[in-house]
């Protein structure tokens, strides 16, 4: 996506209840209460479920992902996630968004 594109002009690429996987390390940017800035919230490969979808700056979708392993609910951009669902018996690794 180019920086001048508005992501919310299209429907969100993940649905509520969809299992997703983190594509990169996610650290607290200061918006996660009770954790220090820079503290790790999710590691590459962690999986969770989309529990809500919001927007940021009227430009990007923010997916609230519940990571069952830690219990954290972390807001993630679509570029930080990939689907972890199995589609018709094909592992998600071969069907990434």
Image: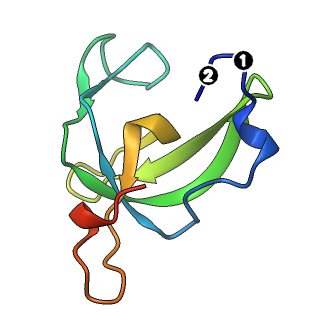
Residue 13 seen: yes
Give SS at disc 2.
Answer: loop
**Picture layout, residue 2 above or below residue 11:** above
Q: Which residue is mark 1?
A: 4
- Image point (55%, 46%), residue name: 63
In this rendering, position of residue 19 left or right of residue 93: right
- Image point (24%, 29%), residue name: 25
Q: CA distance from mark 1 to mark 2?
A: 5 Å
In this rendering, position of residue 18 left or right of residue 53: left
Residue 77 seen: no
Residue nearest the viewer, comparing 73 with 83 = 83
> Counting other residues with Cα less than 10 Å from the Cα at mark 1, is it few (<14), some (14-19), or many (20 or more)?
few
> Counting other residues with Cα less than 10 Å from the Cα at mark 2, is it few (<14), some (14-19), or many (20 or more)?
few
- Image point (63%, 17%), residue name: 3
Q: Which residue is mark 2?
A: 2
Image location of residue 69, percent across then percent down: 20, 55
Image location of residue 55, percent across then percent down: 71, 37
- Tally of numbered discs: 2
- Residue 88 in which image quadrant: bottom left
- Residue 96 in which image quadrant: bottom left
- Residue 73, labelled with which disc? none
Placement of the N terminus among the 4 image quadrants: top right
Residue nearest the viewer, comparing 4 with 14 = 4
- Image point (69%, 43%), residue name: 54
Image location of residue 59, percent across then percent down: 75, 28
- Residue 40 in which image quadrant: top left
Residue nearest the viewer, comparing 71 with 80 = 80
Placement of the C terminus among the 4 image quadrants: bottom left
């Amino acid at each position: 996506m180019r920086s001048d594109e508005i992501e919310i002009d299209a429907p969100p690429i993940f649905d509520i209840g969809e299992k997703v996987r983190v594509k990169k390390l996610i650290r607290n940017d200061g918006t996660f209460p009770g954790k220090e800035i820079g503290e790790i919230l999710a590691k590459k490969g962690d999986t969770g479920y989309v529990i809500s979808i919001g927007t940021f700056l009227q430009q990007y979708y923010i997916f609230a992902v519940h990571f069952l392993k830690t219990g954290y609910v972390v807001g993630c951009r679509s570029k930080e996630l990939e689907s972890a669902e199995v589609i018709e018996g094909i592992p998600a690794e071969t069907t990434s968004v």
